[in-house]
């Protein structure tokens, strides 16, 4: 089988400077991991160019972890995804040799693209721009993306000359070459026949004793550097500081996409929305909002300042007031939550319901129009529609060993300061008097009161009140 394009993503590096107990390409970044970004960029590029393609990822350090992730991610891209292993870390040239030797049909492609697995900002449009430079000139064999670096230290320098150019790595450069500010990005597109004709000619006679992929580029090889205007696009991740830099850029890119789609942002510089998050048109995010993981927000919602949402699903016309924390929760249309509310996993807030300040809800289902306005804990509970829960309510769900369920019917009223000791059922249209501690089921339509009888002792208060001097 033949393809138009083969994409080699180099992901074998160890990433020791990141100081994470992970392969570098699995470092977390704005809701994704690093390797997902070049995978998606390559896949989108092939779709935009309407070309058939295969993507081969060359793994090495902790390859089992990387391979497991790729197997799970395979269904999220349209291109064929294959894995090659670089057993010996002998340089980028060695990695590309493994790609051609282990990936079926890689040698049968018309073009080969090489991407680094740790450059998450490069997008499909950048790949299109580079490919356009190659396809515009039939004489060209390969192109390499370059940029002007403010501080070129550590980068391979672009030395132009003849009909092509060469790339000189920092360790091998002379003092004069080190003064060059045009540097190599690590992104290349070449005719596959050109790569195969030269890849096995390169050697490791350099100060790193590695096979440099950059040695494919020579002054007489009809190759060309394509200088991009932005250094930011090609930032690689080798340290936690660089990870922070690219994350900041990606968060801003996500905010720009949200603004373009009709989402209002009070201040995008203080808004942090993962790339995995979806937000509907007309919604409004206040400052210091963090939305992570597989969260989604519908249309015309308002998320006020200092809220943190993780894996939370919010429907339309919902208001989340300031200082709310949510994880694994669901909120239905027109509900209001907060301020200072905490929704834990499997909390489901029904349509038009209200969850007020200092309320914690966990593994509970609130029906339509339920009100839990303040200072309450609802855990392992089912509350029917239009029921009102008073201030200071506690569903006593834990007996020290097991969790038990509280069930409250619809159209009921639970007074302030009540404890319902689970397992317990309260029927529809029931009323529980304030201050009650209830441990027996309450039938439908019943009034329940469970508190000690009040006794007044005339004149006895002075015995307990502090004496004034």
Image (cartoon, rainbow, N blue to C red):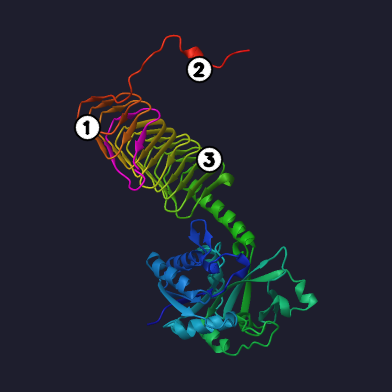
Q: Position of residue 361 (x, y in %)?
A: 39, 40
For the record, the magenta segment spans: 384-407
The reply to whether residue 334 is visible in this rendering is no
Q: Earlier in the sequence, mark 3 or mark 1?
A: 3
Q: Earlier in the sequence, mark 2 or mark 3?
A: 3
Q: Which of the image's four quarters has the C terminus?
A: top right
Position of 73 relative to 190 (above/below): above
Q: Are marks 3 and 1 in contact (CB under 8 Å)?
A: no
**Which disc, if any, is residue 464?**
2
| Label 1, residues with CA under 10 Å away: few <14, some 14-19, many ≥20 | some
Query: Which callout, 1 or 2, points to the residue nearer the camera?
Result: 2
Asked which quadrant contains residue 158, the reply is: bottom right
Q: Position of residue 328 (x, y in %)?
A: 40, 48
Which residue is label 1 attached to? Answer: 427
**Which disc, if any, is residue 306?**
3
Callout 2 secondary element: helix
């Amino acid at each position: 089988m033949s393809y138009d394009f083969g994409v080699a993503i180099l992901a074998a590096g160890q990433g020791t400077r990141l100081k994470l107990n992970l392969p570098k390409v699995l470092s977390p970044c704005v809701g994704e991991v690093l390797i997902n970004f070049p995978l998606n960029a390559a896949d989108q590029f092939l779709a935009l160019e309407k070309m058939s393609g295969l993507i081969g990822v060359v793994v090495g350090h902790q390859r089992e972890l990387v391979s497991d992730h790729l197997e799970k991610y395979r269904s999220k891209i349209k291109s064929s995804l294959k894995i090659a292993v670089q057993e010996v870390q002998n340089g980028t040239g060695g990695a590309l040799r493994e790609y051609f030797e282990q990936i079926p049909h890689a040698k049968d492609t018309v073009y080969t693209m090489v991407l680094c697995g740790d450059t998450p900002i490069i997008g499909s449009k950048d790949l299109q721009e580079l490919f356009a430079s190659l396809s515009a000139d039939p004489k060209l064999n390969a192109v390499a993306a370059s940029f002007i670096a403010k501080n070129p230290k550590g980068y391979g320098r672009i030395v132009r000359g003849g009909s092509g150019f060469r790339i000189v790595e920092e360790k091998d450069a002379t003092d004069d070459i080190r003064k060059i500010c045009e540097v190599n990005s690590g992104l290349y597109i070449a005719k596959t026949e050109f790569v195969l004709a030269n890849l096995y000619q390169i050697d490791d006679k350099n100060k790193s004793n590695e096979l440099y992929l950059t040695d494919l580029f020579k002054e007489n090889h009809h190759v060309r550097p394509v200088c991009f205007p932005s250094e930011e696009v090609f930032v690689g991740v080798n340290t936690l500081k660089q990870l922070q830099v690219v994350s900041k850029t990606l968060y801003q890119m996500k905010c720009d996409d949200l603004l373009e789609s009709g989402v209002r942002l009070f201040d995008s510089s203080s808004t942090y929305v993962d790339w995995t998050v979806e937000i509907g048109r007309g919604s409004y995010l206040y400052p210091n909002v963090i939305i992570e993981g597989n969260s989604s927000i519908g249309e015309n919602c308002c998320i006020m300042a200092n809220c943190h949402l993780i894996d939370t699903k919010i429907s339309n016309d919902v208001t989340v007031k300031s200082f709310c924390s949510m994880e694994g929760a669901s909120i239905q249309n027109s509900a209001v939550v907060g301020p200072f509310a905490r929704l834990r996993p499997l909390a489901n807030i029904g349509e038009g319901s209200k969850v007020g300040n200092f309320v914690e809800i966990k593994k509970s289902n609130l029906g339509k129009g339920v009100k839990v306005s303040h200072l309450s804990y609802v855990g392992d509970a089912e509350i029917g529609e239009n029921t009102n829960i008073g201030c200071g309510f506690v569903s006593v769900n834990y007996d020290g060993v097991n969790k038990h369920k509280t069930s409250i019917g619809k159209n009921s009223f639970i007074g302030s300061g009540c404890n319902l000791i689970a397992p317990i059922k309260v029927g529809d249209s029931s009323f529980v008097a304030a201050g009650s501690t209830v441990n027996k089921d309450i039938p439908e339509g019943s009034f329940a009161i469970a508190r000690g009888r009040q006794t007044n002792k005339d004149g006895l208060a002075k015995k307990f009140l502090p004496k004034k001097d």
